[in-house]
Amino acid sequence: MNHTRAAHRRLERLAFRARPSLETIEFDGWILRFADGYTKRANSVNPHFGSTLPVSEKIAQCEALYAERELPTIFRLTPFSQPEALDRQLAGVGYRLLDRSLVLTCRPMQRPAPGPGSVRHVPRDEWLATFDRLHRLEPTDRAVHRRIVETAEGSSCFAQIDEDGESVSCGLGVLVEDAVGLFDLFTAPDRRRCGHGGTVVASIVRWACRHGARTAYLQTHSRNNPALRLYERLGFALAYPYWYRMAEP
């Protein structure tokens, strides 16, 4: 169990490097991430290691740091969060539960056969323009997303599928050390259930294999059943869950 938890903590660290926030503070074993409010994952407290300070004091300090940045205080919790009673403590002081999610991994690496459509690996700026068109982010979020993508460590694979001259699906792979994270997987609503998502994932995984990856990982909501079925077909399995608790306004 300790070995497994150590491996999961390592994967969390690699994911932070692949998907950086704009600002990070390490506070007594907890990792505080800030990104102007774009996604909870990039704007949350990650209590990976134990505390030397009283937990109530640490929670108050976290609240102050997020308040300084005009952000809500959000904790991203895992089965290996420290201290073990933190989830109950947060619930006891009014933090509500949000978005149960899953980290899925594929090891040894699977190489699924390509599906319909032809994937192109494109330059970063072309891919960002595609993602912006498909996802329709607000201008502020678009700027933050660009900064996150631009500052990622490791090597990146920017994949997209075009049909009839139009971009219909995209995804991003970021390889840090021996693990590739899959992010920003998105298909136009009117082109879903056509196999594009699986084709994009398979293409990124094959790219990562060629560059020395031994593990692929991704994160998805626990209730996203279509995505879960797709990832299972591609060889992904549950590594560990995570969830959020957010302070009531």
Image (tube, rainbow, N blue to C red):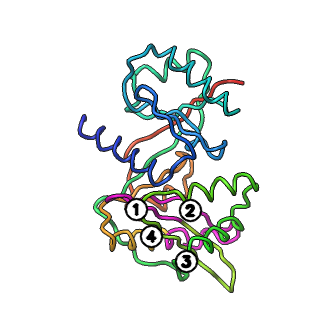
* Residue beneath disc 4: 204
The residue lying at 57 percent from left, 71 percent from top is 124
Residue corresponding to mark 3: 122
| Label 1 neighbour load within 10 Å: few <14, some 14-19, many 20+ | many
Q: Residue 43: x percent and y percent?
A: 59, 39
Considering the numbered disc 4 on the image, is that residue within a helix, a strand or a loop? Answer: helix
State the extent of the magenta-drawn residues as a range: 172-200
Task: Residue 16: give x, y in percent of width and height.
Answer: 46, 47
User: Reading the chain from its start, which is encountered first: label 4 or label 1?
Assistant: 1
Q: Amino acid at mark 3?
A: Val
Question: In the picture, which quadrant includes the N terminus?
Answer: top left
Mark 2–mark 3 Cα distance, whole angstroms, equals: 15 Å
What's the distance in space between the residues labelled 4 and 2, CA to CA? 11 Å
Q: Secondary structure at mark 2?
A: strand
Q: Nearer the viewer, residue 245 or 69?
A: 69
N-terminal of the two: label 2 or label 3?
3
Residue 194 falls inside the magenta stretch: yes
Query: Which amino acid is tagged 2?
Result: Leu
Q: Which badge, 4 or 2, comes first in the chain's sequence?
A: 2
Rounded to the nearest angstrom, the CA distance separating label 2 from label 1 is 16 Å
Q: Residue 102: image x %, image y %?
A: 47, 45
Q: Nearer the viewer, residue 120 or 237?
A: 120
Q: Which residue has dot 1 on it?
A: 175
Residue that numbered label 2 is attached to: 185
